[in-house]
Image (cartoon, rainbow, N blue to C red):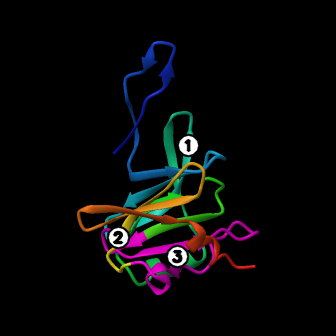
Amino acid sequence: MLYVAERTAGGWSEPKYAGQGMFVSSDRAGNVYTTHLGEKADFICRVVLSGNAIAGYEDLKGGIEKIRGISDSVAHPCAAPDGSYILFDTEGGPHLFVSFKQKDGAWGEAIDLVRHGLDPKAGIASITPDGRYLFFGLGADLYWVSTQLITDLRPN
């Protein structure tokens, strides 16, 4: 479940229920992504907001949709601060992928980061606000690498 609290002059308001979801990420433009917990599968989506409440969920089209066809769990979205790519994992946490946003707004082919040096059990990614570092979990530990790994994969 997702809750929203607003910053006030005296601190933070009481949290209010916003809607269903898990593991929220956003970009600087205000696009919000979450894991939608479906009846048969989990998947990442863009949240459609109405005020401070979730009005709906928009499936991410393109390469991410193809991964959903082979995995029951596509979860834990992590949007780049500039919105140009999104990281996610499969099978409940491990195995990271990246997909770049295309000019038409669809998401490009999902690139398996295991093929580019990350451990197959790496998951639950986070990008620093300046976009320079990628943090991820591996076992019970946290690791970080430069996002140059992702930049080098960006299609021309």
Q: Position of residue 140 (x, y in %)?
A: 23, 63
Residue count near mark 3 (Cα–Cα under 10 Å), binned few <14, some 14–19, many ≥20:
some
Query: Residue 96 appears in which quarter of the rendering?
Result: bottom left
Residue count near mark 2 (Cα–Cα under 10 Å), binned few <14, some 14–19, many ≥20:
few
Residue count near mark 1 (Cα–Cα under 10 Å), binned few <14, some 14–19, many ≥20:
some
Q: Dots 3 and 1: beta carbons under 8 Å?
A: no
Q: Can you say which quadrant of the picture contains the C terminus?
A: bottom right
At a point 51% along the width and 34% down the height, the residue shown is 52
Kind of residue at disc 1: Leu
Q: Dots 1 and 2: beta carbons under 8 Å?
A: no
**Residue at the spot of label 3:** 65
Q: Which residues lie in the magenta part?
A: 89-118
Kind of residue at disc 3: Glu
**Residue at the spot of label 2:** 41
At a point 51% along the width and 13% down the height, the residue shown is 9
At a point 46% along the width and 63% down the height, the residue shown is 44
Q: Is residue 71 left or right of residue 60?
A: left
Query: Residue 99 appears in which quarter of the rendering?
Result: bottom right
**Residue at the spot of label 1:** 49
* Secondary element type, mark 1: strand
Give the Cα distance between marks 2 and 3: 12 Å
Q: Position of residue 125 (x, y in %)?
A: 43, 62
